[in-house]
Amino acid sequence: MYSNGDIFVGEIIGTAILILFGAGVCAAVTLNHSKAKASGWVVIAFGWGFGVLAGAYTAGPLSGGHLNPAVTLGIAIDTGEWGKVWIYLLGQMVGAMLGAVLAYLVYYAQFNANVSRNVKDKLTSAHEPTPTLGVFSTIPEIRNTAANLVTEIIATIALVLPILAFGLTEGLGESGTQTLIVAFLVVGIGLSLGGPTGYAINPARDLGPRIVHTFLPIPNKGTSDWSYAWIPVAGPLIGGALAGLIYNVAF
């Protein structure tokens, strides 16, 4: 249905918008000298939800607006169509990195001011994740490999299985209502299941910005926490695959 070129461009644009909104709201809430400083988790959850809304509606005509390797994997397992999966994944990764760079540029002054204050207050360490990493990627509240992995798997099933089931409701896709519902679904996941790990539920959303964080010239930014980075990749992929299998069996 969609050409390879349209898929690639659509997923780049849509995922970049998603990360621009998502990393942007995390920066707004986290960084010093931001007008939204300390406005809280509810603001973050809605910011990410609106990012999904804007990104998916924009990419929809070109690629269907997956914006998430876990969604792409779940759909491929359901349909058995694997030929274009790699194009979706490549576009999503490029878009995620682009969106992270754009969010950094928007909050460039705040990143510098935030780091300067943290240095003064001795709140950062070269050996620990800093608040700047939390703008780009997820950091668990309690480091427990099994618990963190299970959280990401369950949260991703809670995303991908409803997305697949929405396709059974006649008219949702044609009217565009499905994308709106998915956006609210992401908000709900953030509010209900996001507390333990920050709800990556999307390998590109976490890995792309983490790569960008590694190379961005943020003073005293600390580690990019690569020892944890496999969990928000593996967990959502496992969750997406399980959602596709559950959908095939149950529906």
Image: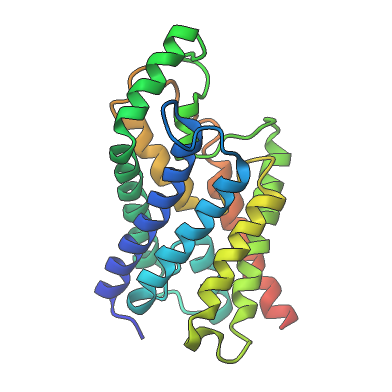
Q: Can residue 84 be seen in this view?
A: no
Residue in the picture at 49% in, 13% down: 125
State left or right for residue 250 relative to residue 4: right
Residue 232 drawn at (x, y percent)? 56, 45
Q: Residue furthest left?
A: 5
State left or right for residue 27 relative to residue 200: left
Residue 124 drawn at (x, y percent)? 49, 15
Quick one: 137 or 179, which is closer to the camera? 179
Residue in the picture at 70% in, 55% down: 154
Q: Quadrant of the C terminus?
A: bottom right
Q: Is residue 51 visible?
A: yes
In the displayed structure, 106 sits above or below 32; it is below
State left or right for residue 186 relative to residue 22: right
Q: Residue furthest front?
A: 35
State the colouring used for the structure image. Answer: rainbow
Q: How many marks?
A: 0
Q: Please tell me in which quadrant of the rendered image residue 8 appears.
A: bottom left
Q: In which quarter of the image is the N terminus?
A: bottom left
Quick one: 151 or 145, which is closer to the camera? 151
Residue 152 drawn at (x, y percent)? 64, 49
Residue in the picture at 42% in, 14% down: 117
Residue in the picture at 66% in, 64% down: 242
Residue 147 drawn at (x, y percent)? 73, 40
Quick one: 216 or 175, which is closer to the camera? 175
State left or right for residue 6 relative to residue 183: left
In the displayed structure, 204 sits above or below 61; it is above
